[in-house]
Image (cartoon, rainbow, N blue to C red):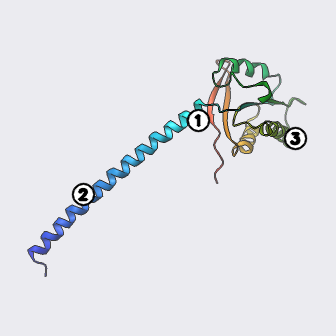
C-alpha cells in the first residue's frame, strides 16, 4: 500500500513539523519573557512615581491620633515628602471604644466623603494609611479598588515605622 518513497516523504514532513513546532515554541517563550520584563518595569515605574498630583488619605478607627505620625513618615519618604497640605485628608472615628455593626455605614460614609474631597481636587495617585479593624479595611479596599492608583501603607509595630505594602488591585469577579 505504501512504498518506500511515501515513507520517505512522511519522514521529511515529520521533521519539518517538528522544526516548525520548535521555532514557534521558542518564539512564544521569548515573547512571554519580554512581556514579563515589560510588566516588571511598568510595576517598578508605578511604585516609584507619585504622579503630578499625589494625595494622602489617613483612616484612623483606633484610639489616639495618627496624623502626626503619618506626617512625620511623609517627611522622610521621598515619594510623599512633597504632597501639599490641601491633598492630605484624614478621617478619624472615635465616638466609642468599640465599633458596632451599626456604626459601619456611618464610618464608610465618612471615609467616602473624605475620598470624594480628594477626588474633586484631581488627585492622580493616593497613599492610604489605615489603622482599624481588618473587616472595615477590606470594605475600604473594595470601595477604593477601582480608583486611580492607590498605595497601601501599614504600620510595622515592631519598628514603629510605616511600610509600603503594595498597590490596591481592582476587584475582579
Answer yes or no: do the residues labelled 1 and 2 have beta carbons within 8 Å?
no
Looking at the picture, tell me which residue is in the foreground, 161 or 22.
22
**Residue position marked by numbered label 1 in the rendering:** 46
Answer yes or no: do the residues labelled 1 and 3 have beta carbons within 8 Å?
no
**Residue position marked by numbered label 2 in the rendering:** 19
Question: From the viewer's perspective, is the residue at label 1 or at label 3 nearer?
Answer: 1
Residue 77: which numbered mark, if any?
Answer: none
Could you say whether the residue bearing mark 1 is in a helix, strand or loop?
A: helix
Residue 75 sits in which quadrant?
top right
Q: Quadrant of the C terminus?
A: bottom right
Query: Quick one: label 1 or label 3, which is nearer the N terminus?
Result: 1
Measured from the top left, where is residue 22 in percent x and y? Answer: 28, 55
- Mark 1–mark 3 Cα distance, whole angstroms, equals 33 Å
Measured from the top left, where is residue 172 in percent x and y? Answer: 63, 51
Residue 106: which numbered mark, if any?
Answer: 3
- Mark 1–mark 2 Cα distance, whole angstroms, equals 41 Å
Mark 3 closeness class: few <14, some 14–19, many ≥20 residues within 10 Å? few
Q: 147 left or right of 42?
A: right
Most extreme residue toward the left, as rendered? 4
Can see residue 88? no
Measured from the top left, where is residue 23 in percent x and y? Answer: 29, 54
Q: 100 left or right of 153?
A: right
Query: Quick one: label 2 or label 3, which is nearer the N terminus?
Result: 2
- Mark 2–mark 3 Cα distance, whole angstroms, equals 66 Å
Residue 7 sits in which quadrant?
bottom left
Residue 120 sits in which quadrant?
top right
**Residue drawn at 66 percent across, 48 percent down:** 171
Question: From the viewer's perspective, is the residue at label 1 or at label 2 nearer?
Answer: 1
Could you say whether the residue bearing mark 3 is in a helix, strand or loop?
A: helix
Amino acid at each position: 500500500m505504501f512504498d518506500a518513497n511515501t515513507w520517505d516523504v512522511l519522514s521529511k514532513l515529520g521533521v519539518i513539523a517538528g522544526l516548525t513546532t520548535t521555532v514557534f515554541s521558542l518564539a512564544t517563550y521569548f515573547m512571554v519573557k519580554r512581556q514579563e520584563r515589560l510588566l516588571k518595569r511598568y510595576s517598578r515605574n508605578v511604585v516609584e512615581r507619585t504622579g503630578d498630583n499625589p494625595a494622602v488619605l489617613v483612616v484612623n478607627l483606633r484610639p489616639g491620633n495618627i496624623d502626626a505620625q503619618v506626617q512625620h513618615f511623609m517627611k522622610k519618604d521621598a515619594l510623599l515628602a512633597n504632597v501639599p497640605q490641601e491633598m492630605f485628608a484624614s478621617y478619624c472615628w472615635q465616638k466609642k471604644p468599640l465599633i458596632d455593626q451599626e456604626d459601619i455605614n456611618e464610618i464608610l460614609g465618612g471615609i467616602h466623603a473624605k475620598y470624594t474631597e480628594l477626588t474633586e481636587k484631581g488627585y492622580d495617585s493616593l497613599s492610604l494609611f489605615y489603622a482599624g479593624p481588618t473587616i472595615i479595611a477590606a470594605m475600604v479596599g473594595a470601595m477604593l479598588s477601582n480608583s486611580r492608583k492607590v498605595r497601601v501603607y501599614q504600620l510595622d509595630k515592631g519598628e514603629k515605622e510605616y511600610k509600603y505594602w503594595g498597590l490596591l488591585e481592582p476587584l475582579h469577579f
